[in-house]
Amino acid sequence: MSFENFVALCGITSLLAYIVDKSINDVVQKFLMIPDAEQNSIFRMFSQLLMLLSVQFGVTSLESEERYKMIFSISWMMGISVLSKINAQICQKLVSLSIMGNVSYNNHARALTVAFLTLIISSTWLTFIFNSYVSENWLFPVTIFNIEILISLTISLVIYVLNLIHYHCCTVWYELYDYIYYLQSLKSIVTLVLAVVVFAKGFYKLFESGSILRLLFLFVHFYHNVWCQIVLGWGLLKKRKLIYDCVNSLPIATTEEVTEMGGCCVICLNDVAKHIVCVTRCNHFFHSYCLRKWLNERRTCPICHRIILTLINTDAEEPVRARERRRVHTH
Ligand SMILES: [Zn+2]
Ligand SMILES: [Zn+2]
């Protein structure tokens, strides 16, 4: 492997990354009307991934025929990472579209088109792999990533439909927030389990080959797909517990108080009498479910903008006082 070959390889991989970025991601992002902000990171990711894969597969030290075979397998890996990236964008887009509500049908149609195309490509790819009976090492991660795309996109579509039903349905659906949380947790768990499977398989192969580069590749995979996922999931779990503790520590308004207050909950704009109502320290009242949903996005009171989340949790006495107040109210 000469220095010239290595430089040529760098050139080819960067060019390939540039073409992929320009031709596929650009088109998809424009079609979905996503701002340009993410593009640089995608380009960087491809360049790094390509370099990493080239080194991992030892492309540079192979004979020319073998090299083409390797480049072919790298192309498949590249393809699946493009599809994964598009999948991540479309999942995010679907959820944000369904939450916003007053978005044009054009936006929905574009997002659904990309979602269904992704589903079709991914399932066709999987069927092809299962029918081809070729057993190559690199087919394993491609298969796993395709399975991940199918599962996560299906879950995102379910969340999208649930949010839309909620938006267009006249009745208030307070439990929706919990259902969506469970669905998102399921998606994270599936992603994590599949990443661990890829890691375990790679680890097993590491003992066979003993390659330092494979170890490096495994380390990067473990850090990004396993460790960061666990940290993210743990952070979300902690946040959810904090929000639950916070809302549970607030006094609940009695039936008399609710009748006296009247009006609507400013978060869902529905009659306060429709569900359990809690009173914040700044003396504003909201449905408990609505406040939990609100605190997931912001930590301040929707009316007076005083901080609700930290106020209660940093003040050790507050939950006690709140409980006392609740006791007084319920008597
Ligand atoms: Zn409400
Ligand atoms: Zn307030």
Image: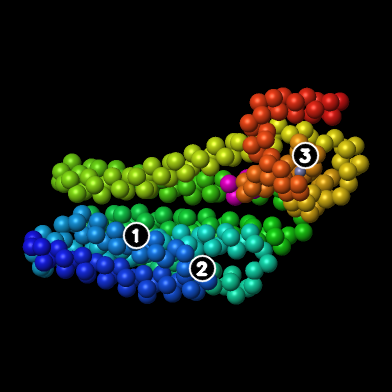
Q: Which residue is mark 1?
A: 45
Q: Nearer the viewer, residue 302 or 75?
A: 302
> Which residue does the image show at 71% across and 62% down from the upper left?
168
Mark 1 → mark 2, Cα distance in angstroms: 18 Å
Q: Which residue is mark 2?
A: 34
Q: For mark 3, what is the residue?
A: 282
**Mark nearer the viewer, 2 or 3:** 3
Which image quadrant for residue 136? bottom left
| Residue at the image position 91 percent from the left and 41 percent from the top | 260
**Percent coordinates x, y for residue 200 in the rendering:** 29, 43
The image shows residue 322, relative to residue 304, as above or below, that is: above
- Is disc 2 surrounded by few (<14), some (14 to 19) or many (20+) residues within 10 Å? some
Comes first in the chain, label 2 or label 3 = 2
Question: Taking the image as drawn, is residue 129 in sight?
Answer: no
For label 1, the SS is: helix
- Is disc 3's CB within 8 Å of ligand 2? yes
Q: What's the residue at 57%, 59% (across, down)?
A: 95
